[in-house]
Amino acid sequence: MLLLDKDDCPFCWKVRIAAAELGLALEIVAASSEEGKAGVARHSPQGTAPVLVDGDLGIWESAVIVEYLDDRGGGRLVGGDAETRARARLLQVFSDRVVGEGLREVVFEKRSKPQDQWDLERIARGEKTWRGHLGWLEAALGEAEFFLGDFSVAECALYPRFALAGKFGVGVDERHPKLRSWFGRLHDRPSITASRPKG
Ligand SMILES: N[C@@H](CCC(=O)N[C@@H](CS)C(=O)NCC(=O)O)C(=O)O
Protein backbone atom coordinates (compact mmCIF):
# COMPACT_ATOMS: atom_id res chain seq x y z
CA MET A 1 0.00 0.00 0.00
CA LEU A 2 1.17 3.46 -0.92
CA LEU A 3 0.51 6.62 1.11
CA LEU A 4 0.55 9.94 -0.72
CA ASP A 5 1.66 12.04 2.18
CA LYS A 6 2.45 15.51 3.47
CA ASP A 7 4.95 15.20 6.26
CA ASP A 8 3.55 17.97 8.51
CA CYS A 9 -0.16 17.41 7.77
CA PRO A 10 -2.10 16.22 10.86
CA PHE A 11 -4.44 14.07 8.75
CA CYS A 12 -1.41 12.31 7.19
CA TRP A 13 0.29 11.87 10.55
CA LYS A 14 -2.91 10.27 11.88
CA VAL A 15 -2.72 7.69 9.09
CA ARG A 16 0.99 7.04 9.69
CA ILE A 17 0.35 6.46 13.41
CA ALA A 18 -2.51 4.05 12.65
CA ALA A 19 -0.41 2.03 10.18
CA ALA A 20 2.53 1.85 12.61
CA GLU A 21 0.22 0.85 15.44
CA LEU A 22 -1.26 -1.96 13.34
CA GLY A 23 2.13 -3.10 12.03
CA LEU A 24 1.16 -2.39 8.42
CA ALA A 25 3.94 -1.29 6.07
CA LEU A 26 3.17 1.72 3.91
CA GLU A 27 5.32 3.04 1.12
CA ILE A 28 5.40 6.78 1.74
CA VAL A 29 5.37 9.01 -1.34
CA ALA A 30 5.54 12.79 -0.90
CA ALA A 31 2.40 14.40 -2.32
CA SER A 32 4.68 17.15 -3.63
CA SER A 33 6.71 14.73 -5.80
CA GLU A 34 5.78 14.11 -9.45
CA GLU A 35 4.43 10.66 -8.57
CA GLY A 36 2.58 12.10 -5.58
CA LYS A 37 1.00 14.93 -7.56
CA ALA A 38 -0.18 12.51 -10.25
CA GLY A 39 -1.63 10.15 -7.62
CA VAL A 40 -3.46 12.93 -5.77
CA ALA A 41 -4.85 14.30 -9.05
CA ARG A 42 -6.02 10.82 -10.05
CA HIS A 43 -7.65 9.76 -6.80
CA SER A 44 -8.60 12.81 -4.73
CA PRO A 45 -11.56 14.89 -5.91
CA GLN A 46 -10.51 17.53 -3.36
CA GLY A 47 -6.84 17.48 -4.32
CA THR A 48 -5.87 16.73 -0.73
CA ALA A 49 -3.45 14.41 1.02
CA PRO A 50 -3.48 11.84 2.49
CA VAL A 51 -4.44 9.37 -0.22
CA LEU A 52 -4.00 5.64 0.33
CA VAL A 53 -3.51 3.62 -2.83
CA ASP A 54 -4.03 -0.13 -2.64
CA GLY A 55 -4.08 -1.64 -6.13
CA ASP A 56 -6.90 0.07 -8.01
CA LEU A 57 -8.40 1.52 -4.86
CA GLY A 58 -7.59 5.12 -4.00
CA ILE A 59 -8.95 6.35 -0.63
CA TRP A 60 -8.82 10.14 -0.29
CA GLU A 61 -10.36 10.78 3.12
CA SER A 62 -8.21 10.14 6.18
CA ALA A 63 -11.05 8.81 8.38
CA VAL A 64 -11.90 6.23 5.73
CA ILE A 65 -8.22 5.35 5.31
CA VAL A 66 -7.83 4.70 9.03
CA GLU A 67 -10.89 2.43 9.10
CA TYR A 68 -9.64 0.58 6.02
CA LEU A 69 -6.24 0.01 7.65
CA ASP A 70 -7.99 -1.12 10.82
CA ASP A 71 -10.05 -3.62 8.80
CA ARG A 72 -6.87 -4.90 7.17
CA GLY A 73 -4.82 -4.92 10.37
CA GLY A 74 -7.05 -6.73 12.85
CA GLY A 75 -9.57 -4.13 14.00
CA ARG A 76 -7.93 -2.82 17.17
CA LEU A 77 -8.32 0.91 16.59
CA VAL A 78 -12.03 1.49 16.06
CA GLY A 79 -13.41 -0.89 18.66
CA GLY A 80 -15.65 -3.92 18.72
CA ASP A 81 -19.17 -3.07 19.83
CA ALA A 82 -21.52 -0.54 18.27
CA GLU A 83 -21.28 1.96 21.12
CA THR A 84 -17.47 1.99 21.17
CA ARG A 85 -17.34 2.32 17.39
CA ALA A 86 -19.73 5.27 17.51
CA ARG A 87 -17.64 6.94 20.23
CA ALA A 88 -14.44 6.31 18.26
CA ARG A 89 -15.91 7.85 15.13
CA LEU A 90 -17.26 10.86 17.01
CA LEU A 91 -13.84 11.55 18.52
CA GLN A 92 -12.25 11.31 15.10
CA VAL A 93 -14.86 13.67 13.61
CA PHE A 94 -14.31 16.03 16.54
CA SER A 95 -10.58 16.03 15.90
CA ASP A 96 -10.80 16.36 12.11
CA ARG A 97 -13.61 18.87 11.80
CA VAL A 98 -14.10 20.70 15.07
CA VAL A 99 -10.67 20.96 16.72
CA GLY A 100 -9.09 21.62 13.33
CA GLU A 101 -11.23 24.72 12.84
CA GLY A 102 -10.05 26.57 15.95
CA LEU A 103 -6.42 25.58 15.68
CA ARG A 104 -6.28 26.56 12.02
CA GLU A 105 -6.84 30.23 12.95
CA VAL A 106 -3.69 30.16 15.06
CA VAL A 107 -1.55 27.97 12.82
CA PHE A 108 -2.38 29.62 9.50
CA GLU A 109 -1.90 33.11 10.90
CA LYS A 110 1.46 32.35 12.51
CA ARG A 111 2.73 30.22 9.65
CA SER A 112 1.82 32.56 6.82
CA LYS A 113 3.28 35.87 8.07
CA PRO A 114 6.24 37.38 9.90
CA GLN A 115 5.47 37.91 13.58
CA ASP A 116 5.15 41.69 13.33
CA GLN A 117 2.27 41.23 10.88
CA TRP A 118 0.26 38.67 12.84
CA ASP A 119 -3.42 39.43 13.31
CA LEU A 120 -3.46 39.07 17.11
CA GLU A 121 -7.25 39.17 17.28
CA ARG A 122 -7.50 36.22 14.92
CA ILE A 123 -4.94 34.31 16.97
CA ALA A 124 -6.75 35.09 20.24
CA ARG A 125 -10.07 34.00 18.71
CA GLY A 126 -8.56 30.71 17.52
CA GLU A 127 -6.87 30.08 20.85
CA LYS A 128 -10.12 30.70 22.74
CA THR A 129 -11.95 28.22 20.53
CA TRP A 130 -9.14 25.67 20.92
CA ARG A 131 -9.09 26.06 24.73
CA GLY A 132 -12.87 25.51 24.77
CA HIS A 133 -12.33 22.29 22.85
CA LEU A 134 -9.68 21.24 25.35
CA GLY A 135 -12.27 21.58 28.11
CA TRP A 136 -14.60 19.26 26.21
CA LEU A 137 -11.82 16.74 25.64
CA GLU A 138 -10.66 16.88 29.27
CA ALA A 139 -14.19 15.90 30.33
CA ALA A 140 -14.38 13.18 27.65
CA LEU A 141 -11.07 11.65 28.82
CA GLY A 142 -12.02 11.73 32.49
CA GLU A 143 -9.76 9.48 34.58
CA ALA A 144 -9.03 7.08 31.73
CA GLU A 145 -5.58 6.44 30.32
CA PHE A 146 -6.88 6.59 26.75
CA PHE A 147 -10.12 8.07 25.38
CA LEU A 148 -11.72 4.69 24.77
CA GLY A 149 -9.92 2.67 27.42
CA ASP A 150 -7.23 1.40 25.06
CA PHE A 151 -5.20 3.24 22.43
CA SER A 152 -7.59 3.86 19.53
CA VAL A 153 -8.31 5.98 16.51
CA ALA A 154 -9.00 8.84 18.95
CA GLU A 155 -5.30 8.98 19.89
CA CYS A 156 -4.24 8.60 16.23
CA ALA A 157 -6.35 11.64 15.32
CA LEU A 158 -5.85 13.84 18.37
CA TYR A 159 -2.14 13.44 19.12
CA PRO A 160 -1.04 15.24 15.92
CA ARG A 161 -3.39 18.16 16.74
CA PHE A 162 -1.88 18.55 20.19
CA ALA A 163 1.64 18.35 18.79
CA LEU A 164 0.78 21.01 16.20
CA ALA A 165 -0.75 23.22 18.89
CA GLY A 166 2.45 22.94 20.94
CA LYS A 167 4.58 23.84 17.95
CA PHE A 168 2.53 27.01 17.45
CA GLY A 169 2.57 28.11 21.09
CA VAL A 170 -0.88 26.97 22.26
CA GLY A 171 -0.03 23.58 23.71
CA VAL A 172 -1.96 21.91 26.49
CA ASP A 173 -0.92 23.25 29.91
CA GLU A 174 -1.75 22.92 33.62
CA ARG A 175 -5.30 24.17 33.01
CA HIS A 176 -6.02 20.70 31.59
CA PRO A 177 -3.97 18.29 33.74
CA LYS A 178 -5.60 15.07 32.53
CA LEU A 179 -5.00 15.91 28.90
CA ARG A 180 -1.48 17.05 29.70
CA SER A 181 -0.70 13.66 31.26
CA TRP A 182 -2.35 11.87 28.34
CA PHE A 183 -0.22 13.85 25.87
CA GLY A 184 2.94 13.16 27.88
CA ARG A 185 2.19 9.43 28.05
CA LEU A 186 1.98 9.22 24.28
CA HIS A 187 5.16 11.14 23.56
CA ASP A 188 7.47 8.11 23.42
CA ARG A 189 5.03 5.56 22.07
CA PRO A 190 6.81 3.75 19.20
CA SER A 191 4.02 4.32 16.63
CA ILE A 192 4.18 8.05 17.34
CA THR A 193 7.95 8.47 17.34
CA ALA A 194 8.28 6.39 14.16
CA SER A 195 5.75 8.52 12.30
CA ARG A 196 6.65 11.98 13.65
CA PRO A 197 7.08 14.71 10.98
CA LYS A 198 10.71 15.19 10.01
CA GLY A 199 10.44 18.97 9.64
N1 LIG B 1 -10.84 15.74 4.98
C1 LIG B 1 -9.50 15.50 4.49
C2 LIG B 1 -8.64 16.72 4.74
C3 LIG B 1 -7.23 16.56 4.22
C4 LIG B 1 -6.52 17.91 4.08
O1 LIG B 1 -7.14 18.98 4.30
N2 LIG B 1 -5.24 17.86 3.68
C5 LIG B 1 -4.50 19.09 3.44
C6 LIG B 1 -3.12 19.03 4.05
S1 LIG B 1 -3.21 19.05 5.83
C7 LIG B 1 -4.29 19.26 1.95
O2 LIG B 1 -3.86 18.32 1.27
N3 LIG B 1 -4.58 20.48 1.44
C8 LIG B 1 -4.39 20.81 0.04
C9 LIG B 1 -3.05 21.38 -0.22
O3 LIG B 1 -2.24 21.55 0.71
O4 LIG B 1 -2.74 21.61 -1.40
C10 LIG B 1 -8.94 14.24 5.15
O5 LIG B 1 -9.26 14.01 6.33
O6 LIG B 1 -8.20 13.48 4.49
Image (spheres, rainbow, N blue to C red):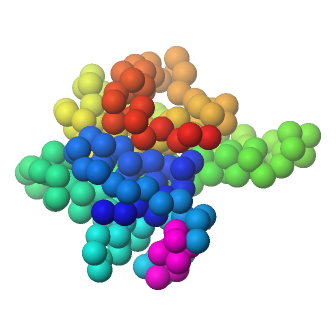
Residue 82's place in the image compared with 103, above or below, is below
Camera sees residue 68: yes
In the rendered image, the quadrant that contains the C terminus is top right
What residue occupies the far right of the structure in this picture?
Answer: 116
The residue under the point 68% across, 45% down is 106
Query: Which region is colored magenta?
Result: 35-42
Residue at (78, 52) in percent of width and height: 112
Magenta part, dominant SS: helix
Residue closer to the observer: 34 or 96: 34
* The N terminus: image quadrant: bottom left
Q: Is residue 92 left or right of residue 161?
A: left
The percent coordinates of residue 43 (x first, y second) are 43, 79
Q: Is residue 136 visible?
A: no
Side of 137 where 106 appears, left or right: right
- Residue 104 percent across, percent down from the top left: 62, 51
**Residue 164, placed above or below residue 176:** below
> Horizontal placement of 76 versus 102: left or right?
left
For this orientation, the residue located farthest to the left is 81
Q: How many marks?
A: 0
Instruction: Locate residue 107, reporting x and y percent.
Output: 67, 46
Pick the front one: 101 or 184 = 184
Residue at 24% from the left image edge and 35% from the top image edge: 151
Determine if the magenta segment contains residue 40.
yes
Residue 24 picture location, percent across and down: 25, 50
For image coordinates 37% across by 52% down, the residue present is 15
Residue 152 covered by magenta stretch: no
Q: Nearer the viewer, residue 107 or 6?
A: 6
Q: Is residue 69 left or right of residue 181?
A: left
